[in-house]
Image (tube, helix red, strand yellow):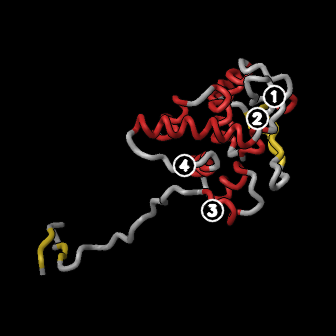
Amino acid sequence: DEEYQAIYEEAAPALRVGMEISYLCAARVSDVLSLKWSQVSEEGIFIQQGKTGTKQIKVWTERLHNAIELAKTLGGRETVVCSSKKTKYSKSGFNDLWETAREAAGKKLDRKLPCTFHDLKAKGISDYEGSSKDKQLFSGHKTESQVVVYDRKVKISPTLDLPVLGKSEDDDGEFYTK
């Protein structure tokens, strides 16, 4: 979260839009860069994943809406995330924006940030609350096993809760050592 925030603060507006769409929608960079205004509707954002072909409408949240409002200021006629020339970013051009913001954020935080833009999709899946099946539906993966690769949060699991060795409870509820 700290790294995301630091990179976002250093990012150009087009990168900010792309970061939010990727993170909030668990979208790949290719899907973000090819996103067209015709895919933005009252219901949300229609994303057909280039890799899996999965079709989803990502419903509006306030934060996703804010990202699209920022995208409108970029002036792209066809694509949501566009360059200063109002055209679709190339993957390498967009990656240059990422590298510039990531390096500036690293200096601000006084450490190297080894993350990639693709890590934003993993962060979105990891931060999404729910079971691996819920995360599969959110991310558009075809199988739960694909989701496991992206879900990087360490699971908190219960521990076997048994009485302490060498201690017993007497009839009054007091503990004593045997």
User: Which label belongs to residue 89?
Assistant: 2
Q: Earlier in the sequence, mark 3 or mark 2?
A: 2
Q: The residue under label 1 is which amino acid type?
A: Thr
Q: Confirm or deny contact between disc 1 and disc 2 (CB under 8 A).
A: yes
Picture quarter with the C terminus: bottom left
**Residue lying at 68% horizontally and 36% vertically, measured from the top left:** 21
Position of 119 compared to 136: left or right? left
Q: Which residue is mark 4?
A: 115
Q: Confirm or deny contact between disc 3 and disc 2 (CB under 8 A).
A: no
State the SS at label 4: loop
Q: Earlier in the sequence, mark 4 or mark 1?
A: 1
Q: Earlier in the sequence, mark 1 or mark 3?
A: 1
Q: The residue under label 4 is which amino acid type?
A: Cys
Between 146 and 134, which is closer to the camera in this rendering? 146
State the SS at label 2: loop
Please state which of the two labelled residues, at mark 3 or mark 2, is closer to the viewer: 2
- The x and y percentages for residue 120 are 61, 45
Q: CA distance from mark 3 to mark 2?
A: 28 Å
Q: Earlier in the sequence, mark 4 or mark 3?
A: 4
Please state which of the two labelled residues, at mark 4 or mark 1, is closer to the viewer: 1
Q: Dot 1: within a 10 Å radius of its alpha carbon, few (fewer than 14), some, or many (20 or more) residues?
A: some
Q: CA distance from mark 1 to mark 2?
A: 6 Å
